[in-house]
Image (cartoon, helix red, strand yellow):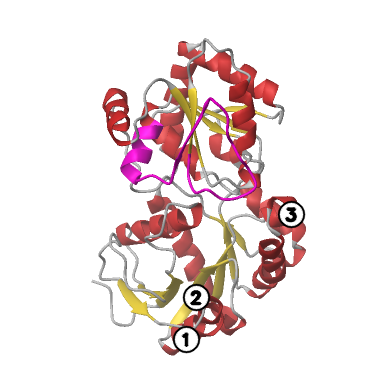
Amino acid sequence: MVSETAPKIAIDARLLGGQSTGDSTYWTGLLLGLSRVNANFRFLLFSNARKPQGIPESENFQWIRIPARSSRWWSLTRFPLNARRMGAGAIHTQYSLSPLAGKTGITTVHDISFMIGPQWFKPKDRTILRTTVPSSIKRAARVITVSETSRKEIQERFPFSGQKVRVTYLAAHPAILPQKKLAAKNGLKKSLKLEGPFVLSVGTKWPRKNMQLAVSAMEMLPAELGHKLVLTGKEGWGEQCENGRVISTGYVSFDQLSALYSAADLYLAPSRHEGFGIPLIEAFECGCPVLCSSGGALPEVAGDGAQVESSWEAADWARDIQALLGDSSKLEELRTRGLERAKRFTWEETARKTLEVYKEVLG
């Protein structure tokens, strides 16, 4: 039982229970990990909405709803002021950290792709990120990021971050569960009317995700190779991603996504830059072989579990895809390595590393 005098940690919980973007997965997974490790802390979960379903039950958690006239006003004032009034010794949010957090502020910066490839962002989003994130990093007591690649990029671009950047690796979304391949295919036939062999790519259709590379590569494959490319995720902007080989499902349920990973013959991750790359781990866990780019932290996360292609040419990706789909022994080797690689990434370990950061801030 957590003691009455246990230190209090305030967490911006607004993304908990949201659609499965990387940010939502991070907070959902972190909270799950915190519920499973032994920690004598009280976690004050602040939001401007009611508590969503699926939040882990724990005597360490307290859900606190604080309405506000706008999301930005909530972040800048309502959240940090109420957290301090309730005695929080550390305040944890992501990217934008209010000055009112004082010396107790912790921000998670998943990546700084808005600095590395500003052309991948809409002007408004790029301006907001470039305005708020550097100052948040500067004022934070600690900065959490999700890979050594991101840590190095943050320290190179923002030297004032000094030695206060900490790395906590991520894991697959807790709701992604491997399925038997035949059962997965049968389920997809019923729920998505999906038949025949396919390769998969998951992510919002943003320029940074570079899905057009996968689309163009698949278009170059010979007609006798019957595989389709299934694209799953939010619509996004900037890419059409259409041809006769592409099936766009839009956003799907976790059960359907688990089935897609489990039934696909190959997973494609052509992203220009990632701070981590959660879909790689999800594909690994579901026994799906992975071909990924060298963008950002993808090689770091993939390790020896995936084939990494450093070229950004569609012809080179088409060659790789055709070679892999025609080599069952290579696919089985990647499948085995991926399953082993996935074991290194758990939300319990993420929680333990994050607790170390909380303890540093609490002193």
> Amino acid under label 2?
Ile
Residue 255 found in image quarter: top left
User: Mark 2 or 1 closer to N-term?
Assistant: 1
On the image, the x and y values in percent for residue 114 come to 69, 56
Q: Which mark is residue 91?
A: 2
> Amino acid under label 3?
Pro
On the image, the x and y values in percent for residue 26 come to 46, 56
Q: Which mark is residue 219?
A: none
**Residue under the point 46% across and 12% down:** 329
- Callout 2: SS: strand
Would you call the spot at circle 1 few (<14 residues within 10 Å), some (14-19), or many (20 or more)? some
> Amino acid under label 1?
Arg
Is 73 within the magenta? no
Q: Is residue 4 above or below residue 1?
A: below
**Residue under the point 40% across and 59% down:** 18
Given contact means CB atoms under 8 Å apart, are the residues at marks 3 and 2 in contact? no
Which range of residues does the magenta coloring cover?
A: 232-261
Of badges 3 and 2, the one in the foreground is 3
List the residue tagged with mark 1: 84
Q: Nearer the viewer, residue 181 or 218?
A: 218
- Callout 1: SS: helix
On the image, the x and y values in percent for residue 342 come to 43, 37
List the residue tagged with mark 3: 118
Of badges 1 and 3, the one in the foreground is 3
